Image: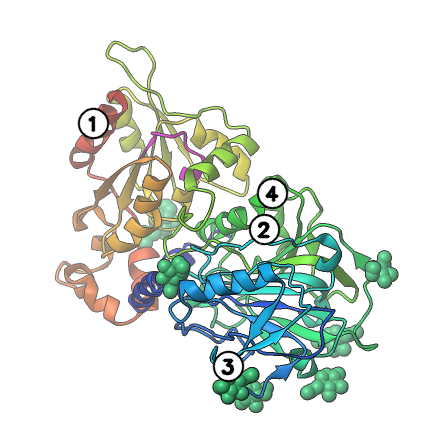
């Protein structure tokens, strides 16, 4: 079930490079935002300002034509990034206000069309700076419009859609139905999206189901709604690496929190790549975010209809286990607070120990069974007790809530790098994580998966990098073997070779004398 192989998968050298690009791309604000307004009152309108910024990844979009040949009964307004000046934005806002539209895609010769009532908002460039220029949108016209905003944000692709949305599970399709024919619907414009927030892994076979979003005209062959939902929907995949506890949080639960929390539980979850054990495991969390029973949408022959759909998850940036507060109203601290509330976790902050205190700080040793296991956990516990810790040894299992209570009762937690450390999300604030870093250049993965995230959660961090003598690899390889001499050589042989040795074949025998100062340091921190 817990497959740690997957955990560090994403940190292979190759992918590390990609991550680097990802970060760069994020800086460049690669978001593609566009906005489509169907206006029911109008005759044909030419295209206005159709501009797509060139991000590093546009495969999401099938809407490809910016040519002047697009004389059509629909307008597409894209106010975007570099190419669109503040003036342009202001001008468009002004046009909206005047209920008149000056239209020409080059902006040079202007056609004035009267009687255009655009009661809507314009989306301005990136999500991080997107301002909705509010206008007098009213509910009556809302139904007749389609709003579509697709983004590539960090490591996720997602679309936010408003309109007549019909979801047909059997063909993994979300239809956006327009009452009128226009060029995009006439050409059956569609594009695909994989609603799993780890972009660099999406190419893998059977990773996450591919969904189509299709703009269509309301024709007799478009199936009718068999169920009309009054609440918005979020469609996301629980496939991919979700079986790994770390990935469950970093790829799904944290971005799901960012996406769903604004709806205050009034949102319908549609799950693709069903995995009932996953849903059972995270039931408490899913219920905390939606009060409606989850719909397993794959392979269904009925038509679920919504007026609002988010397909894919928002808020996934390039950091692991993280929420970027510059693009989200939430932070990781909000997230951990939310977890404590829903799992009824009592301890908000770690114990502050004073001299002469009778209370003992509680230390949890997270154990592992198959690999990266401590071989001398008894000895470690003895050491900790001699330093006045109250010691608990536990291994996370399928009972998330039970383990959450155990870890939340502690002040210090230690464990070898691995998915189990993800449980730090349940720690009280100011608690301390001691990450034991195994032999073999696992430093980078250790930092991005737990050290950096711990800081965002207000968890204090210490680590202990083992020496080769503390690794059981020395029992499997002669002292001068390349595995022990130079892990980077194995790294060059590829990720699988690397993983199969340093992550899968290594146990850890802590040198308690060498480790002692780390536990002492944690005690000192608890006194501060
Ligand atoms: C744009 O779409 C048309 C029709 O769908 C297709 O024939 C054409 O090759 C596309 N152009 C680009 C640049 O993708
Ligand atoms: C997005 O808009 C803001 C404010 O209008 C502007 O400062 C910024 O440069 C724009 N982003 C890009 C990528 O052009
Ligand atoms: C926009 O103006 C240019 C230059 O005057 C003209 O050639 C073009 O046909 C106009 N386009 C539209 C859509 O009106
Ligand atoms: C459902 O999907 C299957 C497999 O893709 C396909 O053979 C079948 O025709 C679909 N049924 C309907 C009613 O669309
Ligand atoms: C779009 O789909 C409809 C229904 O399948 C079909 O009649 C029509 O020819 C298609 N249009 C194009 C341009 O492919
Ligand atoms: C859903 O809503 C549409 C449009 O209002 C209506 O035509 C249809 O009958 C409704 N379907 C169901 C099953 O209620
Ligand atoms: C590591 O420890 C576990 C649990 O004791 C054991 O099953 C496994 O075989 C050990 N692996 C190695 C490579 O020693």
Q: Are marks 4 and 2 in contact (CB under 8 Å)?
A: no
Name the residue rendered at 81%, 58% in the picture.
227
| Mark carried by residue 357 | none
Q: Secondary structure at mark 2?
A: helix
- Residue 190 in sight from this viewpoint: yes
Q: Which residues are magenta?
A: 424-432
Q: Which residue is mark 1?
A: 520
Q: Few, some or many C-alpha atoms within 10 Å of disc 1 (few <14, some 14-19, many ≥20)?
A: few
Q: Are marks 4 and 3 in contact (CB under 8 Å)?
A: no
- How far apart are labels 4 and 2 at the CA level? 16 Å
Nearest-to-viewer mark from 4 and 3 = 3
Q: Which residue is mark 2?
A: 278
Q: Secondary structure at mark 4?
A: helix
As for residue 431 lying within the magenta part, the answer is yes
**Which is nearer the eye, 145 or 175?**
145
Mark before the other along the chain sequence, 4 or 2? 2
Q: Which residue is mark 4?
A: 289
The answer to whether residue 16 is above or below residue 109 is above
Q: Secondary structure at mark 1?
A: helix
- How far apart are labels 2 and 1 at the CA level? 39 Å
The reply, left or right, for residue 45 in relation to residue 156 is: right
| Residue 220 screen position, x and y as percent | 84, 77
Q: State which quadrant residue 386 falls in.
A: top left
| Residue 288 screen position, x and y as percent | 60, 39
Q: Quadrant of the C terminus?
A: top left
The answer to whether residue 140 is above or below residue 182 is above
Q: Which residue is mark 3?
A: 109
């Amino acid at each position: 079930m817990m497959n740690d192989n997957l955990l560090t998968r994403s940190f292979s050298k190759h992918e590390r490079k990609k991550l680097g690009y990802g970060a760069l791309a994020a800086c460049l604000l690669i978001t593609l935002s566009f906005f489509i307004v169907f206006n029911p009152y109008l005759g044909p309108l030419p295209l206005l300002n159709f501009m797509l910024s060139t991000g590093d990844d546009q495969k999401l979009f099938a809407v490809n034509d910016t040519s002047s040949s697009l004389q059509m009964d629909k307008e597409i307004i894209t106010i975007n990034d570099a190419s669109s000046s503040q003036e342009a934005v202001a001008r468009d806002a002004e046009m909206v206000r005047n209920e008149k539209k000056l239209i020409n895609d080059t902006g040079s010769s202007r056609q004035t069309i009267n009687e255009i009532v655009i009661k809507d908002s314009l989306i301005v460039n990136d999500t991080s700076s997107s301002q909705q220029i509010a206008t007098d949108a009213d509910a009556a016209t809302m139904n007749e419009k389609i709003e579509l905003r697709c983004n590539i944000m960090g490591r996720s692709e997602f679309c936010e859609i408003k309109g007549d949305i019909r979801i047909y599970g059997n063909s993994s399709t979300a239809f956006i139905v327009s009452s009128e024919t226009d060029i995009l619907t006439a050409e059956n414009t569609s594009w695909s999206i994989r609603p799993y927030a780890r972009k660099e892994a999406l190419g893998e076979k059977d990773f996450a189901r591919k969904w189509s979003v299709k703009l269509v005209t309301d024709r007799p062959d478009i199936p009718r709604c068999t169920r009309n939902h009054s609440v918005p929907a979020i469609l996301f995949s629980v496939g991919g690496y979700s079986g790994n506890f770390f990935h469950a949080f970093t790829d799904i639960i944290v971005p799901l929190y960012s996406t769903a929390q604004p709806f205050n539980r009034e949102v319908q979850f549609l799950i693709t790549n069903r995995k009932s054990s996953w849903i059972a495991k995270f039931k408490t969390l899913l219920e905390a975010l939606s009060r409606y029973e989850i719909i397993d949408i794959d392979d269904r022959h009925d038509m679920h209809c919504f007026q609002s759909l988010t397909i894919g998850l928002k808020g996934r940036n390039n950091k692991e286990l993280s929420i970027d507060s510059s693009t989200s109203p939430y932070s990781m601290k909000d997230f951990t607070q939310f977890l404590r509330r829903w799992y009824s976790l009592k301890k908000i902050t770690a114990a502050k120990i004073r001299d002469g205190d009778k209370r003992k700080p509680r230390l949890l040793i997270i154990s592992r069974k198959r690999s990266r296991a401590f071989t001398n956990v008894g000895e470690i516990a003895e050491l900790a007790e001699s330093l006045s810790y109250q010691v608990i040894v536990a291994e996370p299992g399928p009972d998330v809530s039970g383990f959450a209570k155990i870890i939340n009762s502690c002040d210090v937690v230690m464990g070898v790098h691995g998915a189990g450390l993800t449980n730090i999300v349940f720690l009280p604030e100011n608690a301390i994580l001691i990450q034991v870093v195994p032999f073999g250049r696992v430093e980078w993965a250790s930092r991005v998966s737990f050290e950096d995230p711990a800081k965002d959660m207000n968890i204090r961090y210490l680590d202990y990098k083992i020496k080769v003598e503390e690794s059981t690899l020395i029992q499997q390889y002669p002292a001068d073997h390349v595995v022990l001499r130079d892990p980077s050589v194995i790294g060059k042989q590829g990720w699988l070779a690397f993983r199969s040795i340093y992550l899968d074949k290594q146990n850890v025998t802590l040198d308690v004398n060498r480790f002692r100062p780390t536990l002492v340091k944690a005690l000192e921190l608890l006194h501060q």
